Image: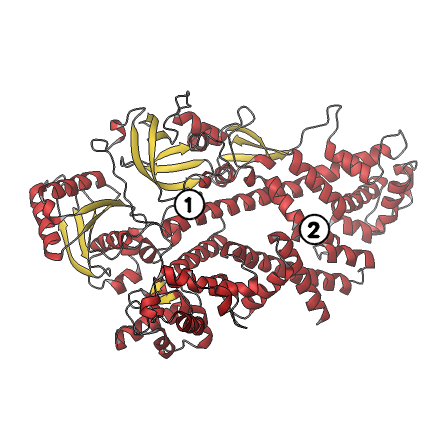
Amino acid sequence: MLEIAYQMKRISQSIAETLSVRQAQVDATIQLLDEGATVPFIARYRKEATGGLDDAQLRTLFERLGYLRELEARRVTILSSIEEQEKLTPELKRDILEADTKTRLEDLYLPYKPKRRTKAQIAREAGLEPLALSLLQDSSLSPEQAATEFIDPEKGIGETKAALDGARQILMERFAEDASLIGRLREYMLDNGQLSAAVVSGKEQEGAKFSDYFEYSEAISKIPSHRALALFRGRNEGVLSLTLSVAENPGGGHPCEGMISKANAIRQQSRAADNWLLETVRWAWRVKISLHLELELLSALRERAEEEAIRVFASNLHDLLLAAPAGPRITIGLDPGLRTGVKVAVVDSTGKVLETDTIYPHVPQRKWDHSMTRLAALAQRHGAELVAIGNGTASRETDKLAAELMQRHPELKLQKLMVSEAGASVYSASALASQELPGMDVSLRGAVSIARRLQDPLAELVKIDPKSIGVGQYQHDVNQGRLVRSLEAVVEDCVNAVGVDVNTASAPLLAQVSGLSNTLAQNIVSFRDEHGAFDSRKILKQVPRLGPKTYEQAAGFMHVMNGSNPLDRSSVHPESYPIVKKIIAETGCRIENLLGNRDELKALQPANFITEKFGLPTVVDIISELEKPGRDPRPDFKTASFKEGVESLQDLKPEMILEGVITNVTNFGAFVDIGVHQDGLVHISNLSNKFVKDPREVVKAGDLVKVKVLDVDIPRRRIGLTLRLDDKAERKPAAKQRQEMTHKPHKKPAQAPMGNSLAAAFAKARKD
């Protein structure tokens, strides 16, 4: 028990240092997590316990807790293993207990790690270790003469060469398993290593897309995420070969070999064993250590690059999920197409399908007027307010159709908007779509999804695998398990930040609510279908398998919009309703008159309502929620207007100023949809007149922006854009910008966020 308590104390101390918070805050959070509380619940409803840690800090704490617990479990395993071998000295135990990273722990364990018989082990069994150690400790000995004493044909040592080869293997393994030495060599390679790439002979044509890396070299500590992942993809596809190397000393000799020699007091002083020992060092470095460190550092580079790519994906997904909703308005969804026609779906304010159709306004049928008449009739019949147009094939042509419809029928008061249809086809063919829209043709389901995602992007996009939404950077090259966990956390945080209407939410949306599983979410929907709309949060307790703990975690995030208790439509947790009763008594207002009454609520003194269970942070939150019950953290709904007459790459001209929507943000810039079926790139250098380290400091997915066209490369379908509308300085063309993203940094360094560097990753690991 004492050992476990010591481990927990060490873990919480480390996390507190990482987050720069008090250890008591960390201890309280860990206890809540271990009791089954979710991050969204803790962030919103347990601020007193955590000292106000926000959801980002809590996510970091959660991830770090997992890492450190794995580290402690591995530490226990290693100590037990070495102890069983009866080789655990007090000094070694101290070093293992002080190891603060998995890398350091494994370095210490390497000499004791069970492994298959090595050449060094065979040499020891032949009795050659005394020869190896004597030559290492006394360089004046003649290797050949000393080896003659160890010749023993029965042990397989028939000559001096065999004895010296065995002794060399023992010393090579000794050098390679020196944890302190390996740590210094790793640091040196990290600080000074150059990663080089070259094209595999005969792959020039096949691997043309990697041509920027056919002759490439860059310091491994400076390679940004997107470039590292491109290099690894090129290697995996058999196009590139990668090599990590360190430059020789100016005066000759390899610096890492020099470090090994120095650590073992080996130097050239013209003594009998000096040359043999220096040759042993060269063999140790080239045969054993360098390959091991190269693999390890490349693996670490990849891991860091994947972490950054996952962070980029998660950030973009967060922005997309929290995009402004059009709200509960009757909407016509159009899924554009040419030969197969434009799929049409009308949904009511709750997303329920009212009617579907297929029209053929474009080639080859060209039933333009007929299609317009059909759309006008649908809009009139159902009182539609919005037209959502998918941004895929034939989107601009369909946008023209909607524009003419609005012009011919101003009485309909329609508003048209272009909507990303990424993932709509995935949803259409899913089992969930079959369940939600039984009997509907797969092609029409996409139009339904497009209409619904305009009404509420969050509610619709949670039905789609986040990896299919298309806002990632090398998303298929990263660790898929870690990617899924990260994206699931983003979805959970977004859903709970907004909250859900328990009477309209789908099962996939409910499943993201704090404390709810897929099964419980489906139970809620089934209960609702059987008994009708929920009249209060209390009725949730009647849902099968929804126990007190789950109710505690979930209730505050589920809103009952038109129930018997007005508080149920707010984010005030039911456990805090007694506080509201005290506020009602203080003000003398009925709850209906208190909600939204800012003047009355602003006059309150929050400290007057503190109880043993609820402190000042909770009371302040309650009053804030009463001021604006059920407030939505998402921005107000706005739309982008694509320029008429600019519908293809051929229509673009330099210096054009256009309106567009940010579709994706990467480490090297942002992509913008300007309505020409090909996103343009705003390179990081053109995002602002000020230096930009991270593009997300300036823009995020879903933002409406005005951009200026820099240049257009029609054959390669590339568009260079800038947000620096008033800057008259000479700019690099888009092709040159893209070259700098990937091309030979040793000739012209590309701008890259230093936060992506491998050096930063290892520095953080050392600090942690």
Left or right: residue 12 versus residue 648 is: right
Left or right: residue 626 versus residue 694 is: left
Whether residue 42 appears in this view of the structure is no
The x and y percentages for residue 369 are: 7, 42
Q: Which residue is drawn at 66% across and 52% down?
A: 101
Residue 208: image quadrant is top left
Q: Residue furthest top?
A: 730
Neighbours of disc 1 within 10 Å: few (<14), some (14-19), many (20+): many
In the depicted structure, whether residue 57 falls above or below residue 395: below
Three-letter residue code for mark 2: Arg
The x and y percentages for residue 359 are: 13, 48
Quadrant location of the N terminus?
A: bottom right
Residue highlighted by disc 1: 472
Q: Which residue is drawn at 16% across and 40% down?
A: 403
Q: Could you say which is closer to the camera, residue 670 or residue 245?
A: 670
Q: Could you say which is closer to the camera, residue 30 or residue 574?
A: 574
Three-letter residue code for mark 1: Gly
Q: What element carries label 1?
A: loop
Q: Could you say which is closer to the camera, residue 390 or residue 284?
A: 390
Q: How far apart are marks 2 and 1 (CA)?
A: 33 Å
